[in-house]
Amino acid sequence: MTLPLPSLKVENYRNIEHLEIPELGLVNLFVGKNNVGKTSLLEALAVYVGKATPMIIDAILVSREEYDSDDESLQGRAEVY
């Protein structure tokens, strides 16, 4: 069976300078101390899977409390990403 995402490479996303996981399984467990990039890795996956749509970027910014979903400035913030 072919995995939907057999490997992963993330570069220059938040605090992840370079991360390469050559082989992913059906279930993957990411563990580590606080503030090492676990959430950033999940966000990068969400951006990839969601094809970086404004809705995905909006959801990430709202979850980080960096953006009020009622604010009209999403377009400007989305261009940053």
Image (tube, helix red, strand yellow):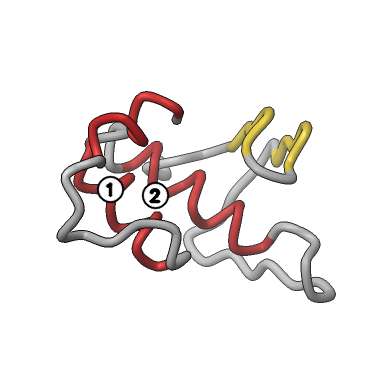
For this rendering, which residue is in front, 35 or 51?
35
Left/right placement of residue 72 relative to residue 27 reads left
Instruction: Give the percent coordinates (x, y) of residue 15.
Output: 74, 45
Q: Which mark is residue 56?
A: 1
Instruction: Give the percent coordinates (x, y) of residue 48.
Output: 40, 37
The residue drawn where x is 31% and y is 30% is 76
Instruction: Give the percent coordinates (x, y) of residue 44.
Output: 51, 44
Secondary structure under the numbered disc 2 in the rendered image: helix
For this rendering, which residue is in front, 5 or 71?
71
- Residue density around tag 2, few if under 14, some if 14–19, many if 20 or more, within 10 Å: some
Residue type marked 1 = Ile
Instruction: Give the percent coordinates (x, y) of residue 45.
Output: 46, 47
The residue drawn where x is 15% and y is 60% is 70
**Residue 33, located in which quarter of the rendered image?**
bottom right
The residue drawn where x is 60% and y is 54% is 40
In the image, residue 8 above or below residue 38: above
For this rendering, which residue is in front, 50 or 35?
35
Image quadrant where one finds the C terminus: top left
Q: Which mark is residue 46?
A: 2
Left/right placement of residue 61 relative to residue 25 reads left
How far apart, in angstroms, are the residues tagged by discs 1 and 2? 7 Å
In the rendered structure, are the residues bearing label 1 and label 2 in contact, judged by CB atoms less than 8 Å apart? Answer: yes
Left/right placement of residue 62 relative to residue 31 reads left
Q: Nearer the viewer, mark 1 or mark 2?
A: 1
**Label 1 vs 2, first from the N-terminus:** 2
